[in-house]
């Protein structure tokens, strides 16, 4: 794994913040009661979590790209990829567990409850899928920045 320069670290941080802000704005702009609103919230929260983890590579608080005074060592880059991979595995396991619980619940419910239970689980699955998308996109962006050298 290669080092990440200061400029590349700033570029990646900006990407993460932009994604979080974009998803947060989509959340705000979507009418209440829409499952899409919850999906955008879940994705924005995941980008915030990823950003906080990335910020952990620096000695001081990062409020803006200008606060990033150095890049990442090769070891830090590997650690960050490992973090993303670990979070991705956990998120995929949560989604698989939700699928299993959904099938179990649908097998037990009465006809009148079936649609509601299915809707609730589908919304949960969608939120978990959005978190997985955020993790995959962040990982891809991080790798692309490193490979541009």
Image (cartoon, rainbow, N blue to C red):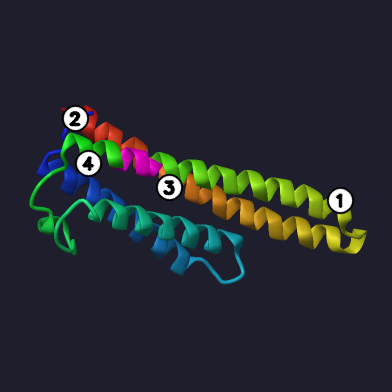
Q: Is disc 1 placed on a helix, strand or loop?
A: helix
- Look at mark 2 in the image and give the residue it sits on: 2
Q: Which residue is mark 4?
A: 76
- Residue at position x 47%, y 42% in the image: 88
Q: Residues within 10 Å of mark 1 (few under 14, many from 20)?
A: few
The residue indicated by pointer 3 is 134
- Circle 3/circle 4 CB separation < 8 Å: no
- The residue carrying pointer 3 sits among few (fewer than 14), some (14 to 19) or many (20 or more) residues within 10 Å by Cα, namely many
Q: Earlier in the sequence, mark 3 or mark 2?
A: 2
Mark 1 — residue? Answer: 107
Q: Is residue 1 left or right of residue 135?
A: left
Circle nearer the N terminus (1, 2): 2
Can you say whether 122 is above or below 73 in the image?
below
Part of the protein shown in magenta: 80-84
Between 62 and 10, which is closer to the camera in this rendering?
Answer: 62
Q: Quadrant of residue 82?
A: top left
């Amino acid at each position: 794994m290669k080092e990440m320069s200061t400029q590349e670290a700033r570029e990646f941080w900006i990407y993460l913040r932009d994604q979080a802000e974009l998803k947060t704005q989509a959340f705000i702009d979507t009418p209440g009661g829409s499952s899409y609103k919850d999906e955008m919230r879940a994705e924005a929260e995941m980008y915030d979590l990823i950003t906080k983890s990335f910020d952990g590579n620096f000695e001081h608080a990062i409020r803006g790209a200008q606060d990033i005074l150095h890049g990442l060592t090769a070891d830090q880059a590997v650690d960050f990829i490992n973090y993303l991979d670990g979070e991705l595995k956990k998120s995929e396991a949560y989604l698989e567990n939700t699928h299993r619980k959904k099938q179990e619940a649908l097998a037990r419910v009465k006809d009148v409850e079936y649609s509601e239970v299915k809707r609730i689980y589908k919304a949960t699955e969608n939120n978990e899928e959005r978190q997985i998308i955020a993790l995959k996109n962040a990982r891809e962006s991080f790798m692309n920045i490193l490979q541009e050298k």
